[in-house]
Image (cartoon, rainbow, N blue to C red):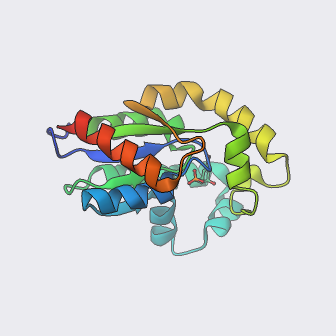
Amino acid sequence: MTTASSGRRHLVLVGLMGAGKTTVGQRCAQLLDRAFVDTDELIVASAGVQFDDIWAAEGEAGFRAREKTAVADAAASPAPLVISCGGGAVLDADNRRRLRATGVVVWLLASSNELASRLVQDDSRPLLAGGDKTATLERLGAQREPAYDAAAHLRVDTEGRTVDEVADVVVEEFRAWNG
Ligand code: S3P
């Protein structure tokens, strides 16, 4: 694994479901004039089947194995990218190492209440199916905090901010960090 030289690092977004990694990442990619990739989309594209079918047929363990390949593929891109990682990607130590070695990792934060309110109409996340979303996000946030903390170079609070506002902050901090 090589370490990216200054100015050529990926911008990597991590954080819980609903943190805005995909929407903010797409906006950051426009601002930085870079390609955007989302690890969930890479997984679906390479599997050739729907997200729900992967999870149903292979379970979370199968999904995580595919996610690890997607993270490695994205991190290995010679062109610097904006990479949105599925919320659980940083639980894997190899993923954390790869992302930190090749990118500047930004942790997008928001309260469980706000995350749940952003996802109120959204039934696409198996981990949030059939339960109280706020409580599940609160629990996942507590469990995952050490992993996000270990992965991240920077933290950006998204609470009460629009996608454009968050993207502006992320790009400013990324540029300051990335040289
Ligand atoms: C997950 C987050 C999802 C997706 C999968 C698992 C997680 O991605 O990878 O449902 O473990 O937090 P988003 O964070 O983009 O919603």
- Would residue 31 be seen by someone viewing this image from the given angle? yes
Where residue 15 appears, as percent x and y from the top left, is 54, 41
Where residue 84 appears, as percent x and y from the top left, is 44, 53
Q: How many marks?
A: 0
Please give the name of the residue rendered at 41% of the width and 50% of the height, measured from the top-left corner.
Answer: 167
Where residue 160 appears, as percent x and y from the top left, is 60, 44
Q: Quadrant of residue 145?
A: top right
50 lies above or below 25: below
Please give the name of the residue rendered at 73% of the width and 33% of the height, measured from the top-left corner.
Answer: 139
Q: Quadrant of residue 104?
A: top left
Q: Quadrant of residue 38?
A: bottom left
- Image side of residue 49 versus residue 168, left or right: right
Residue in the foreground of this view, choosing between 157 and 101? 157
Instruction: Please state, as top left, top right, bottom left or bottom right, where the N terminus lies in the image.
Output: top left
Instruction: Please state, as top left, top right, bottom left or bottom right, where the C terminus lies in the image.
Output: top left
Please give the name of the residue rendered at 79% of the width and 55% of the height, measured from the top-left corner.
Answer: 129
85 lies above or below 140: below
Please give the name of the residue rendered at 65% of the width and 58% of the height, measured from the top-left corner.
Answer: 58
- Image side of residue 176 versus residue 40, left or right: left
Which residue ends up furthest to the bottom in the rendered image? 48
- Would residue 1 be seen by someone viewing this image from the given angle? no
Residue in the foreground of this view, choosing between 76 and 132? 132
Where residue 51 appears, as percent x and y from the top left, is 61, 66
